[in-house]
């Protein structure tokens, strides 16, 4: 499973990072990014939960 964050949609709420800091990181403005290539199986539920909690729907899970 892979995740990505659309930088044009992200508004910096940081919910993704609060839920799953193992997969998401924040830049200096608080905008999310997902530098992890492949999400490990043990973190996939947390990554999906983070995507569901994004108010801007900026996270894509595939």
Image: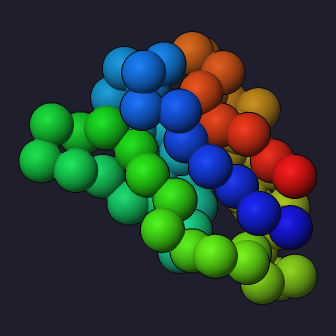
- In the displayed structure image, the side of residue 7 where residue 57 appears, left or right: right
Residue drawn at the location 87% of the way across and 52% of the way down:
62
Residue 14 visible to an observer of this rendering: yes
Residue drawn at the location 12% of the way across and 47% of the way down:
28
Residue drawn at the location 73% of the way across and 78% of the way down:
38
Figure colour scheme: rainbow
Residue 58 at x, y = what percent? 59, 27
Residue 16 at x, y = what percent? 54, 45
- In the displayed structure image, the side of residue 34 where residue 1 appears, left or right: right
Q: Examine the rendered structure and indicate whether residue 57 appears above or below residue 25.
A: above
Residue 26 at x, y = what percent? 30, 52
Quarter-of-image position of residue 60: top right
Residue drawn at the location 86% of the way across and 67% of the way down:
1
- In the displayed structure image, the side of residue 16 where residue 27 appears, left or right: left
Quarter-of-image position of residue 47: bottom right
Q: Examine the rendered structure and indicate whether residue 39 appears above or below residue 8.
A: below
In this view of the protein, which residue sits in the foreground, 15 or 27?
Answer: 27
Quarter-of-image position of residue 31: top left
Q: How many marks?
A: 0
Residue 13 visible to an observer of this rendering: no
Residue 57 at x, y = what percent? 66, 21
Q: Examine the rendered structure and indicate whether residue 3 appears above or below residue 51.
A: below
């Amino acid at each position: 499973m892979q995740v990505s964050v659309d930088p044009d949609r992200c508004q910096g709420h940081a919910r993704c990072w609060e839920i799953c800091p193992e997969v998401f990181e924040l830049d200096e403005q608080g905008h999310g990014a997902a530098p992890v290539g492949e999400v490990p199986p043990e973190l996939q539920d947390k990554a999906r939960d983070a995507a569901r909690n994004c108010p801007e729907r900026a996270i894509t899970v595939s």
